[in-house]
Every structure is written in structure tokens, then in C-alpha cells.
Image (cartoon, rainbow, N blue to C red):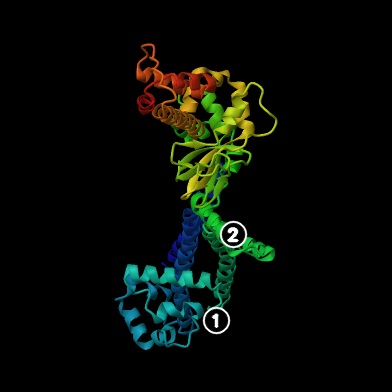
Amino acid sequence: MISAKLILRFTIIFQFLLRLYLTFPLKSQITKATGVVAEAAWAGAAYNLILFMLASHVIGSCWYLLAIERQEHCWKEVCNNEHPNCQYWYFDCRTMYASNRAAWFKSSKISAICGPAGDFQYGIYEDALTCEVTSSKFFNKYFYCLWWGLRSLSSVGQDLATSTYYGENSFAIIIAIVGLVLFALLIGNLQTYLQSTTVRIEEWRVKRTDTEEWMHHRQLPHELRERVRRYDLFKWVTTRGVDEEAILKGLPLDLGRDIKRHLCLDLVRRVPLFDQMDECMLDAICKRLKAVLCTPGTRLVREGDPVNEMLFIVRGHLDSFTTDGGRTGFLNSCRIGPGDFCGEELLTWALDPRPSVSLPSSTRTVTALSEVEAFALIAEDVNYVASRFRKLHSRQIRHTFRSHSHQWRTWAACFIQAAWFRYKRRKEAAKLKAQEGHVTPSPAIKQNGMPLPQLASELAMMAWNGRIGDARDLFDEVPEKSSVLGTS
């Protein structure tokens, strides 16, 4: 039975090697089909770790089988020395209770010589006898062999104390070579996968260190340094180091347009100005929008500075105020939130049939009150959209734009307020003269039957359309100006 058992052992080892070999073409096919073995970093790390554990399982199994073979080799040597009293068939289980085998076993020293405390040199297989691995339960036996293979591969065979037996030394050499190769490939890949999860953090840290060194070299004040740090941190938290524009540029035009439409279409439709536009115009606007991030306290535009872009707010709030060019005692302020926009001077400039070469000046100062995410449409893109799509020049869209524009609302309010102040001054002057007896107040002029709401609407439309003189004349003819202002 010894020859049969030897063939069985090597058959088991051979099928283990075949299983291990099949993993390489399988990996090649997966890589050709999907491009990578695992898309996620943790999956790639787990894959390489499982391959290393599989190699440890194979090495442990071979060690267990070779340990049994080594013990049988010891039995054969003792048997050869005791010839002719010993026969190889004494080692078979079926002859365990044979009379001649029992007589030989009593007179033989095979248990003392081939036991754990014997003189036979087992080398790396000595643990199998010392720990009684062969007589242990299956799970104890399996996990001990797995641990032995994992320990040997991880240490690249450095902890193996071998004997002078050539087969044992060959097995130790194989363990050292396989351990070195697997540790370089699998563990190296495992480290690469794990580091890929933190590579962007390291890049951000390096960039932040460079920024700190640059600010120190330029001797920036503490306030400016804090603003730079807040912006870098907010940008990292929002984007995680991903350059959105670079990703979109690398995609096909049709796919990039669909992604931009998905990201920006709902935001653009919130703006009443663009709600009435067709799909072609909305696609052109969404395609040119670029993401903008702002930290609290950032001044996006100052009153009197050229307006470079039109902003559409996604998240956060901004404060928009004007002093009407620095007028004493004049201040108009409002809050801009998600769905609002600013920089409408660009659209007014683009809608002009003969726009000037220079960009329009801002009539308001816009400051971020909180962390703001927005999309920006630069001046060139606004001019392109306005020149390409004639519908922007329609009267209805102009009225919608002016009714939602903080700039035009301020102008209309200032115009009505100025007219009201003029009326009050005239009324006070007329009353004063009447009291002095110089003149009598003139009778009131009728409104020609026009209802107050219609008159207020007419005044607002004249103000929005720029017919300041006509609106002033109509307003001066109204006797009950307070009712008109209340209706407006």
C-alpha cells in the first residue's frame, strides 16, 4: 500500500498546483473583459489577500503530506536496518493485529527512534510530530497547517530549520521563492490598493503645505491666510479633490451634455427668466455653466467693478446691497438664496443691440453669508447665448427679467420714491402759499376714469421700459398719489 499512498499524495499536490495555476488565466480574462480585476480599492485588496491565503493553504497542505511521508521514510530506514525481521507491509493498517507483526513491534525500537524525542532528524516537519497534528481533529489539523503555511510565506522561509535531507531543503527553497514572489506581487498590490484610498488626501496635504509655505514667503497677514485655509478646506470637503470639469472634458460631447443637463437643468428652470425658454436654449446654457465655491465673507463682486459672470445659486445665501453710486444715506439690501441669481447686468449688456466693448459695471455689492455652491455663466457665454437665440430679445422675457431683477426693482422703487418726494414738496409749498393768502390751491385733476390698479401697473411698466419722462408726467397728474403708491 505504500506505493499507492505515495501516488495518492502526489495526485493531491498536483491538483492543488493545477487549481493555483488556473487563477492566472482567470485573472487575465477578467482583466480583458472589465479592464481591472476589482474597481473598488477594498475589493482589490481583498482579492490579493485571498490569493495569498490560498497560497498559504497549498503550502500548509503540502507540508502536512510531506510530514507523513518523512515519518514513513524514518520507518523504512529502521525497517531496513532490522532486516529480515521487518517487512514494509507491517506499516499497513490491515496488518496491525497480525501475530508476526506484533512480535516484531515488541522487539523493535521504531517508536523510540521515529518518535518526537528520537534521533531521526525531521527538520521542518518536527512540529507535525511534536504537536501531534496527524492525530488531531480535522479543523485543528487544517487551521494549524494553514497557519504554518501563512507563517512560512510571510517570513519568506527565514524561520525554517531544515535537516540535510535534499527533499526537505528543496521544499524550503520553494517556500522561500514563492513567499518572496507573492509578497512582492500580492502584498505589494494590497498596499497599492489601500494607499489608493488615501492618495487624494495626501495630495491635498502636500498642496496645503505648499500653500502655507507660499503664504509665509509672501508674508500674508493672518486674516488673508485664514480665508485661504477656509476656502481650501471647503473645496476639499465639497469635491474631495475631484476636478469635475476635467472629467466632463474627457467624456464624449453627447454624454457630457446629458450630464450637464442632469446637474443644472432643474437649477436653471428655477430662474423665472429661463423658465419660458425652449430646450435648445436651456441645453446651451447648461453646457456653459461652471461650478463655483465660496466661503463666508467672500465678496463676489463690488459695486462699480466690471461684472465678469452671472451666478446661479445652488446652496447657501448671499447679501446683495447697493448705495446707488455712493449716495449719502442711501442703502438698498436684500438676501439671495438657492434658486436666485446675480450679475444680471451682463444680460442687460448682452441684450443691447449695440453693446459696448467694455463689460458693464456692477450696481450692487454681493457678499457670501455662508458656504455657497453656485454655477457661473461667464460674460462670453452670456453674449453667445443672447446673440444666438433671438427669443431673449422678446418683450415678455424682458419684462420677466426686469420683474425678478434686484437692480430693476431698486430703480423702480427709487423712481417712485423720488416722485413721491417731489409731490410732497409741491403739496407742502402749495399749502404754505394758501395759508399766506398769495394763491389758492388749484382744483384736483381727474384720472380720466382710469382705475388705480391699472394706473399703478402702467407706471411700473413705464419705469421698467425706461420711459421715465412719460411716467413722471402721468404721476404728476394723479391727485391721490398715496393711493397709487399703495396699489403699486
* x then y, percent, for residue 208: 59, 61
Instruction: For the N terminus, give its image quadrant.
Output: bottom left
Amino acid of disc 1: Ser
Q: What residue type is labelled 2?
A: Leu
Answer with mark 2 or mark 1, whichever residue precedes in sequence: 1
In screen coordinates, is 235 left or right of 450?
Answer: right
Look at the numbered disc 2 and give the secondary structure of its residue. Answer: helix
In the image, is 273 to the left or to the right of 203?
Answer: left
Pick the front one: 258 or 44: 258
Residue 254 in the image: above or below residue 334: above
Q: Mark 2 points at which residue?
A: 224
Name the residue carrying label 1: 163
Q: Quadrant of residue 132?
A: bottom left
**Residue 30 appears anywhere in the view:** no
Q: Which residue is drawn at 34% across and 74% down?
A: 135
Quick one: label 2, few (<14), some, or many (20+) residues within 10 Å?
Answer: few
| Crowd class of label 1 (few under 14; some 14 to 19; many from 20; radius 10 Å) | some
Is residue 73 at all visible to an observer of this figure? Answer: yes
Real-space Cα separation, disc 2 to disc 1, in angstroms: 72 Å
Which image quadrant for residue 300? top right
